[in-house]
Amino acid sequence: MLNYYRGCNYATKYAIYGTLFGLCFPVLSIILISNFEQTPTIGDFLAAIPLAHNNRLMYVIDMAPVITGILA
């Protein structure tokens, strides 16, 4: 993995890091929604994903990896 990064320029590295950082937002938002909706087990975490997309704000949050990857 480190050999791959040695051949990349800084723009590629920052785009990868920005995308990985942006992936934290959708995951954390689904975790928060599943906690607020009182889903009891981790198996219901996967069931919370369609439930979370009833909220229009989730579509904006789901764009975070794309935006941070482009702007990085």
Image (cartoon, grey):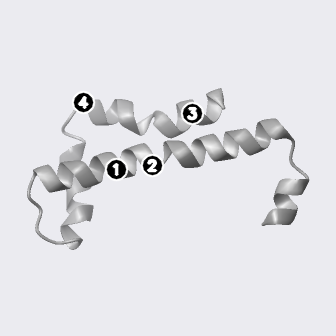
Q: Quadrant of the N terminus?
A: bottom right
Percent coordinates x, y for residue 70 in the rendering: 64, 30
Three-letter amino acid code at the position of disc 4:
Arg
> Where does label 4 land, which residue?
56
Percent coordinates x, y for residue 43 in the rendering: 22, 72
Instruction: Decide which of tag 1 and tag 4 comes sooner along the chain.
Output: 1
Q: Residue at point 23% right, 71% down? A: 42
> Where does label 1 land, which residue?
28
Mark 1 vs mark 4, CA separation in Å? 16 Å
Mark 1 vs mark 3, CA separation in Å? 16 Å
Instruction: Decide which of tag 3 and tag 4 comes sooner along the chain.
Output: 4
The answer to whether 47 appears left or right of 19 in the picture is: left
Circles 2 and 1 in contact, beta carbons < 8 Å? yes
Circles 2 and 3 in contact, beta carbons < 8 Å? no
Circles 3 and 4 in contact, beta carbons < 8 Å? no
The residue lying toward the viewer, choosing from 47 and 65, is 65
Q: What kind of element bears circle 3?
A: helix
Residue 53, image quadrant: top left
Instruction: Give the answer, above or below, for where 36 lies relative to 68.
Output: below
Q: Quadrant of the C terminus?
A: top right
Instruction: Decide which of tag 1 and tag 3 comes sooner along the chain.
Output: 1
